[in-house]
Image (cartoon, rainbow, N blue to C red):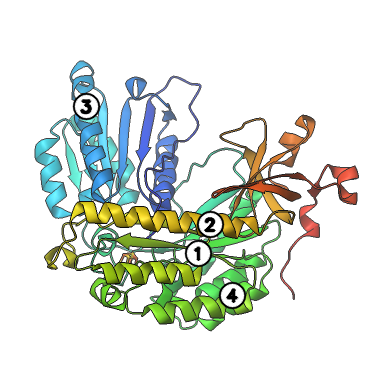
Amino acid sequence: MNGEANARAMPPASTRRGRLAHIVTLGCQMNVRDSQTLAGMLARMGYGFTDRMDEADLILFNTCSVRENPERKIYGQVSSLRQLKERRPDLIIGLTGCMPQQRPELERMQVSLPHVDLIMGTLNLHRFPELLQQVMETGRRVVEVWHDEGPIVEGLPVLREPGSVTAFVSVIYGCDYRCTFCVVPNTRGRQRSRRPEAIEEEVRSLVAEGVREVTLLGQTVNAYGRDLPERGITLARLLRRLSRIEGLERLRFTSNHPREVTEELIEAMAELPKVMEHIHLAVQSGSDRILHRMGRRYTAEEFVEQVTAMRRRIPDLAVTTDIIVGFPGETERDFEATLELVRAVRFDGAFTFVYSPRPGTAALRLPDPVPEPVKRERIQRLIELQNAISLERNQVYRGRVEEILVEGASEKDPERLSGRTRTNKVVVFDAPPSARTRLVGQLVDVRVEAVNTWTLFGRLTDGPQEAASIGAVPAAARASEPS
Ligand code: SF4
């Protein structure tokens, strides 16, 4: 499970006035990636895209079930469209993603959202064009949610932000773990890995389009390959295979289960220059008692030892995590154990969550719920501790020269450029206006001059390369896999 919520993935607005779609995406990177596929299928059907709901012919919500909040948000947003639908009966409203995969939610949304025209799940994403066509032809509601995983459908069209130098590539769907708090096994099905050759083909075509950094996605990405019939297909081997692709500069992968980190994976990370020095490793709690209740299958000590072993082999490694506070039965002592683990590991960053009971999960039946005010107070203490550690870890970067992949103008400060270090830290830096467009997609050296808890700030170095290329280091001069 990964922590990002409320991500919104919208393709660029169209300039044509054909049929227009508006896609709202909530949840993790997997949903962002699915929305890109939905957008690709819509583009193939002749749709353009709009940022405005009121001018859309199709409004599609790609939903998330990991926590209660995004679910409530969806009900609120979809309910508020009722009047628009009354004014414009030809408007099509669709719901997909994890929420419809849960039977109780599916029943609830069919009753309480009568103005929704199309409801489909995550396992039949490829059926979207056909289902949408049915809605258009019949003018009647279409509901199709699969509860059994079919084969992986390759070759679906994908629409990404034009000019983007980074991309997500799903390599494994579903999850075979049964963590007691998590809806993913219910909403995404069992673990299914894509064929390595299909992944390679997708990455090659992304590189041909100008992508320089690829993040491999999966709920437990480091379990990749275990379900494939051939033995020996692993994430480490996939990283080695993809590392050979010329023009691809950087590889990342997320999210990782601590039980699936192998020596082979650590070696691949240490050896392959294109694999970045960052791992997102969800710990969830520092208390063995709570980890056991969560069904996580490791102890706090094992987790700390694992991170220590990884840092020994990859000294610059940045480690980020997910932590749940207020899981049923969590005592003050259990919570103290989590704080202790955070102090011991010194994560670079953490997505912290207050436990939220989810229908269909085993944790729902666990006794001893933690009162809301206690949860709030604990998460506040955790955030304060983690923020202080994140700041200290960022301070180390002051004065250092870091390799940055330039992604574009900084969102908060469009006069400056933004990119990431190899360790996945966001860097905002000055660059001459004349060079800004040219630098996007380049690896450059930036001297870090200031930091805060979340961001590093700096400027291009004055190295000899800069005289010729204003800090842009030719891609070919950078990392390539040793033969
Ligand atoms: S490993 Fe656990 S938390 Fe992560 S997706 Fe699977 S069941 Fe959910």
Q: CA distance from mark 2 to mark 4?
A: 17 Å
* Image height of 298 relative to 319, above or below: below
Name the front one of labels 1 and 4.
1
Choose the circle earlier in sequence order: 2 or 3.
3
Tell me the quadrant of ligand 1. Answer: bottom left
Judged left or right of residue 148, residue 191 is right
Name the front one of labels 4 and 3.
4
Q: CA distance from mark 2 to mark 3?
A: 39 Å
Choose the circle earlier in sequence order: 1 or 3.
3
Q: Amino acid at mark 4?
A: Arg
Residue 352 rendering spot, x and y as whole percentages: 37, 56
Q: CA distance from mark 1 to mark 4?
A: 12 Å
Callout 2–callout 1 Cβ contact below 8 Å: yes
Choose the circle earlier in sequence order: 2 or 4.
4
At 59% from the left edge and 51% from the top edge, which residue is drawn?
206
Q: CA distance from mark 2 to mark 1?
A: 7 Å
- Which residue is labeled 2 in the image? 390
Judged left or right of residue 411, residue 304 is left
Q: Amino acid at mark 2?
A: Ser
Residue 263 rendering spot, x and y as whole percentages: 54, 83
At 74% from the left edge and 74% from the top edge, which residue is drawn?
482
Secondary element at image label 2: helix
At 62% from the left edge and 78% from the top edge, which residue is drawn?
313
* Image height of 150 relative to 145, above or below: below
Secondary element at image label 4: helix
- Which residue is labeled 3 in the image? 80
Q: CA distance from mark 1 to mark 3?
A: 41 Å
Q: Nearer the viewer, residue 209 or 156?
A: 209
Q: Residues within 10 Å of mark 2 (few under 14, many from 20)?
A: many
Camera sees residue 77: yes
- Which residue is labeled 4 in the image? 311
Judged left or right of residue 164, residue 69 is left
